[in-house]
Image (cartoon, grey):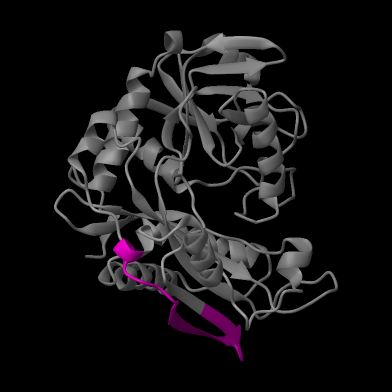
């Protein structure tokens, strides 16, 4: 299923004006989840299109014309005990605030972000729109498990000239989601495209950043790869991140290395969580510049991380026609341990000793 436009019926929307934010919960047209699942595809598509339409928001604005927008991605996950919890929404709220501020928008308060995410998930769940925990998910380390994808984003007020947004909307929609990467292979390739440049918006989760990501990932998939990895814009030798995820390399020396944060790297919430979990295991974790030559010669495991990706193994990396296979093409031991730990915490099969999960139900 991966991502789907068939969003849940309750949406949160806030508007900035007169120096304050005003929010509301909007319940869109819907049937019961069971009735909607029984609809013909054309009817399902029509319902999804209806929920995706807002007739009181301008089409011509700084977002549609210039890509001036930022967004977040986080998940609410069904728990083994029957509950429903969100993974680290405070960190997403903090990043959303910084992204909006970085785009010179009036930032949305972090506490309002968390409260709105929780309440939107809760209202939809009370209408029956939520996944239920399935024990069989444990057999494949939750690779095919369901969850709720929470997508907060900004939309600018009407405008046609190049400008900043002074009175934006913040909208939060929910949709069902499963595995992000499709099966088949876990190979990656170094793309010759450039994702971000110094003094740019690479550190912001800006909508405009993902145009290059969409193109580069499409090209990688057309060539038979699951994912693409970027090099830096200046030296063209240091690894940066994947199409929409951070990247880690477990080196032969026993060091777990990931590119250091800067103005070209997105500060991922899953990235930070994995670093903490690895340090708990007395693994040496380094956030530094990592040359592609070092990766190809010294890497023994590789994985990408993100809200959608989780911790997804990369079993090979191709650069300038040279293919290096990690761990004999199998999922590495540390990769599997970190993946299983973070998934266990998220789905409630392992204790949440970090206080990362915020309970909804």
Residue 106, picture quadrant: bottom right
Examine the rendered structure and indicate whether residue 337 appears above or below residue 214. above
Q: Quadrant of residue 262?
A: top right
- The x and y percentages for residue 226 are 56, 28
Residue positioned 45% across, 83% down in the render: 24
- How many numbered circles does the render carry? 0
The quadrant holding residue 135 is: top left
Quadrant location, the C terminus: bottom left
Q: Does residue 194 appear left or right of residue 145 in this picture?
A: right
Q: Residue at x 30, y 40 (%)?
A: 343
Q: Locate the N terminus and report the quarter of the image it occupies.
A: top left
Q: Choose between 54 and 289: the one closer to the eye.
A: 54
Q: Residue at x 48, y 33 (%)?
A: 182
Q: Is residue 258 in sight in this rendering?
A: yes
Q: Position of residue 286 (x, y in %)?
A: 48, 29
Relative to 198, is 322 above or below? above
- Residue 280 percent location from the top left of the image: 28, 34
Identify which residue is drawn at 42% across, 71% down: 9
Q: Nearer the viewer, residue 13 or 221?
A: 221
Relative placement, left or right, of 56 versus 301 is right
Asked if residue 36 is positioned above or below residue 145 in the image, the reply reads below
Taking the magenta stretch, the answer to whether it contains residue 31 is yes
In the image: residue 125, left or right of residue 208: left
- The foreground one among 52 and 228 is 52
Point out residue 95 in the picture as x, y percentages from the top left corner: 51, 58
Which residues lie in the magenta part? 14-35
Along the horizontal axis of the image, is 83 left or right of 153?
left
């Amino acid at each position: 299923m991966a991502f789907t436009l068939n969003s849940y019926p309750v949406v949160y929307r806030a508007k900035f004006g007169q120096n304050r934010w005003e929010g509301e919960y909007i319940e869109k047209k819907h049937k019961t989840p069971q009735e909607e699942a029984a609809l013909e595809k054309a009817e399902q598509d029509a319902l999804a299109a209806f929920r995706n339409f807002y007739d009181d928001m301008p089409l011509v604005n700084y977002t549609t014309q210039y890509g001036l927008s930022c967004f977040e991605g986080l998940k609410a996950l069904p728990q083994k005990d029957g509950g429903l919890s969100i993974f680290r929404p405070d960190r997403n709220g903090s990043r959303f605030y910084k992204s909006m501020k970085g785009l010179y928008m009036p930032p949305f308060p972090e506490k309002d972000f968390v409260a709105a995410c929780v309440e939107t998930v809760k209202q939809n769940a009370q209408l029956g729109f939520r996944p239920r925990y399935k024990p069989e998910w444990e057999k494949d380390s939750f690779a095919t498990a369901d969850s709720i994808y929470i997508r907060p984003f900004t939309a600018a007020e009407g405008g046609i000239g190049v400008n900043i947004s002074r009175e934006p909307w913040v909208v939060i929609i929910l949709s069902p989601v499963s595995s992000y990467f499709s099966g088949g292979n876990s190979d990656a390739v170094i793309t010759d495209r450039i994702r971000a440049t110094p003094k740019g918006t690479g550190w912001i989760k800006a909508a405009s950043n993902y145009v290059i990501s969409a193109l580069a990932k499409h090209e990688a998939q057309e060539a038979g790869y699951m994912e693409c990895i970027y090099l830096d814009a200046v030296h063209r030798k240091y690894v940066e991140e994947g199409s929409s995820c951070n990247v880690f390399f477990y080196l032969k020396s026993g060091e777990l290395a990931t590119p250091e944060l800067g103005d070209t790297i997105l500060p991922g919430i899953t990235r930070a969580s994995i670093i903490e979990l690895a340090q708990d295991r007395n693994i040496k974790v380094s956030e530094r510049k990592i040359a592609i030559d070092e990766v190809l010669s010294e890497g023994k495991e590789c994985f990408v991380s993100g809200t959608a990706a989780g911790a997804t193994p990369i079993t090979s990396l191709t650069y300038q026609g040279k293919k290096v296979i990690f761990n004999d093409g199998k999922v590495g031991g540390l990769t599997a341990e970190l993946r299983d730990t973070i998934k266990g915490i998220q789905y409630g099969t392992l204790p949440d000793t970090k206080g990362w999960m915020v309970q909804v139900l």
